Amino acid sequence: MDYRLIAGLGNPGPEYEATRHNAGFLALDLLADELGARYWKNESGALVAHVQHGDEELLLVKPQAYMNTSGGPISKLAAAYKIAPAELLVIHDEMDLDPGTIRVKVGGGHGGHNGLKSIHAKLGSDAYTRVRVGTGHPPGRKSVTDFVLQVPRGAEAESFEHAVALAADAALCAIDEGATTAMNRFN
């Protein structure tokens, strides 16, 4: 059986649930609903749902480490299930994209994103697919940390929710039809 690992990045705990930084968790929850995931279990420092999808078993993963150390649980699960970096898809927030937009990307640098830095360091590779959910940059002199850990409000909340839903759709497209098709359709 083929395994693929789809990780949504975020911070654990109810105080972070709807924040910009939890875009990956939010999109993964939508994807889990779409795929009929029945339950999540604790495994290797993450909440994991195993879902049969076609000929593959998908591991939907929400690391329960904070963003900066999310590579640990992801790399442990990838090793345990013999999942190569090319079979990994990561959904995460991205300040370098406008709110309400997403981009699918294969490989490349971490762009300063601490969650991706951790994954790169633990896997020793950047050869995985990412679905990037745009949050935009903080206004004025507002700190990046404060910005990403806030819940979007008003019109921004609507565009954020739209982007999260698009990210779930793009992830499913990448799983079913490949990253190139997802890039052509969603970028």
Image (cartoon, grey):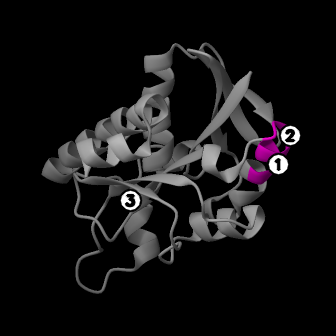
**Image: 51 above or below 64:** above
Which residue position holds label 1? 76
**Image: 114 above or below 17:** below
Between residue 141 and residue 72, name the one nearer to us.
Answer: 72
Which residue position holds label 2? 80
**Residue at position x 23%, y 84% in the image:** 140
Between residue 35 and residue 173, name the one nearer to us.
Answer: 173
Residue furthest right in the image? 80
> Which kind of residue does numbered mark 2 sit on?
Ala
Instruction: Please say whether residue 45 is visible from this viewpoint.
Output: no
Tell me which segment is drawn in magenta. 75-82
Label 2 Cα neighbours within 10 Å, binned few <14 / some 14-19 / many ≥20: few
Q: How many marks?
A: 3
Place of residue 172 in the rendered image (x, y in percent of width and height, measured from the top left): 43, 31
- 44 relative position to 17: left or right: right
CB contact under 8 Å: marks 2 and 1: yes
Residue furthest left in the image? 155
Which residue position holds label 3? 150
> Which kind of residue does numbered mark 1 sit on?
Lys
Between residue 11 and residue 129, name the one nearer to us.
Answer: 129
Gap in angstroms between the C-alphas marked 2 and 1 = 6 Å
Place of residue 145 in the rendered image (x, y in percent of width and height, measured from the top left): 46, 72
Determine the image quadrant of residue 162.
top left
**Residue at position x 50%, y 69% in the image:** 108
Residue furthest bottom in the image? 141
